[in-house]
Image (cartoon, rainbow, N blue to C red):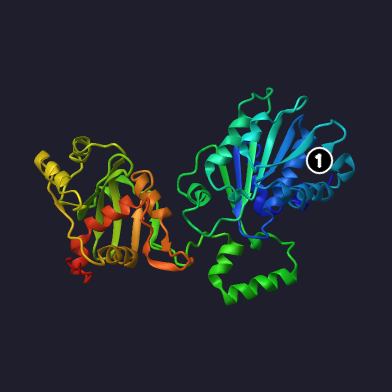
Amino acid sequence: MISLKNVILPSFYDFWKATKLAFTFYVAKGGRNSSKSTTISIIIILAIVAMPINALAIRKVANTLQESVYEQLREATFLLGIEDEFLFNKSPLKITYIRRGNYILFRGADNPEKFKSIKTSEFPIAYIWVEELTEFKTEDELQIIIDSILRAGLPEGLQYKFFYSYNPPKRKQHWVNKKFESQFIPKSYFVHHSDYRDNKYLSEQTLQEIEILKELNYRKYEWNYLGKPIGGGVVPFENLTFRRIEDNEFNSFDNLREGIDWGYAVDPFAYGQWHYDKTRRKIYAMNEVYGVKVSNREAYERIKRIHKVKIIADSAEPKSIAEMRQYGLNISGARKGQGSVEYGEKWLDDLVEIVIDPLRTPNIAREFENIDYEVDKDGNLKAKLEDKDNHTIDLTRYAFEDDMKRDGFYLLDI
């Protein structure tokens, strides 16, 4: 067998080593031509040779299997120099390791419910590869498949390994981007990002074509070949910094702002507290209270321990403002006006830095990280953020309302 160092690129050594650890999910994302699929196919072929297991390769649409994952896995046997040890069937699609009799199955996920009945008798399905993960419209579709496979126990010494490969979608709000382009990766996931610069085997002609696109349309180059979810073409809040805010730094914050965006049943209630370094034009997220079905009384009990300065709240609920005032909060309604949303978003975007510690304020981090610009029905960018999952962004606009006015972002009364 050919040495692995000759077939797996150095940039994927950590990915390969991670398969020996206790992760369940292995995510290979990035730009085109980065060798994601080649690496996963080699890992699966080696697993079939080494262990008494079967594998399952999945695409959303069945008729795409043969020309993608099937040929990729077949090529992996050639790269490893062991193609004579496998039997390749095309009807139905199946790759069998002759010496042991275990194999790789191929299935389309046109109807995820069908996976509930998938069974293999002699060898368990332990390695699962989902190619082009973004073809799944929702995470729920994928979860049906995962649950169907995980329900059976494996013999001692074997582990389930799920491999996902994909090029990140352009829209930041796509469920795949929200899950894996995030500060909050579950501990059972190993996420790896790669791009064409990691692949030393690309032809000179391919590299030339990439350079041409880089010159003509840099944003498209970033999306296609660097694997960046660029959104509508302009990234909101490029001034975001996610990092740990240590206690000594946190305790030095003294120029505070507080805001509330109301919610209860479906939309969450959101309170946030920020520090404003006016000299350096930086803001720091300090505390949050966030959740659905949080009553005003419950919110008050949670806020009163950290409440320091006047809260500026969404003025759409004067009864809630009055109730909070009765409880003892220093609170008033925001002075909304024509263009106030756009003004507030621009003010935040013009700051030198928005610093967020995901451990202290996870919901503020998630919403600022995931937000994208609205687009019209023709896909054209609009100068306004999407009006969903933006509750902490709204409360931040309210909290800094007076600062915006002093900076020339005047709110026009209507």
Q: Residue at x 18, y 57 (%)?
A: 334
At label 1, counting other C-alpha atoms closer than 10 Å, the crowd grade (few under 14, some 14-19, many 20 or more) is few
Q: Residue at x 60, y 52 (%)?
A: 29
Q: Is mark 1 on a helix, strand or loop?
A: loop
Q: Residue at x 18, y 44 (%)?
A: 307
Q: In which quarter of the image is residue 368?
A: bottom left
The amino acid beneath tag 1 is: Pro
Vertical position of residue 38 compared to residue 214: above or below: above
Q: In which quarter of the image is residue 359?
A: top left
Residue 75 or residue 336, whichever sits in front: 336
The answer to whether residue 322 is left or right of residue 302 is left
Residue positioned most to the right? 84
Q: Find residue 5 and report its horizontal and vertical position in percent.
A: 75, 50
Q: Find residue 180 and report its horizontal and vertical position in percent.
A: 52, 48
Quarter occupied by the C terminus: bottom left
Q: Find residue 77 and report its horizontal and vertical position in percent.
A: 82, 46
Vertical position of residue 149 compared to residue 58: above or below: above
Q: How many labels does the image show?
A: 1
Q: Name the residue under label 1.
A: 92
Quarter occupied by the N terminus: top right
Residue 335 or residue 32, whichever sits in front: 335
The answer to whether residue 326 is left or right of residue 14 is left
Vertical position of residue 339 compared to residue 169: above or below: below
Q: Find residue 387 and report its horizontal and vertical position in percent.
A: 36, 56
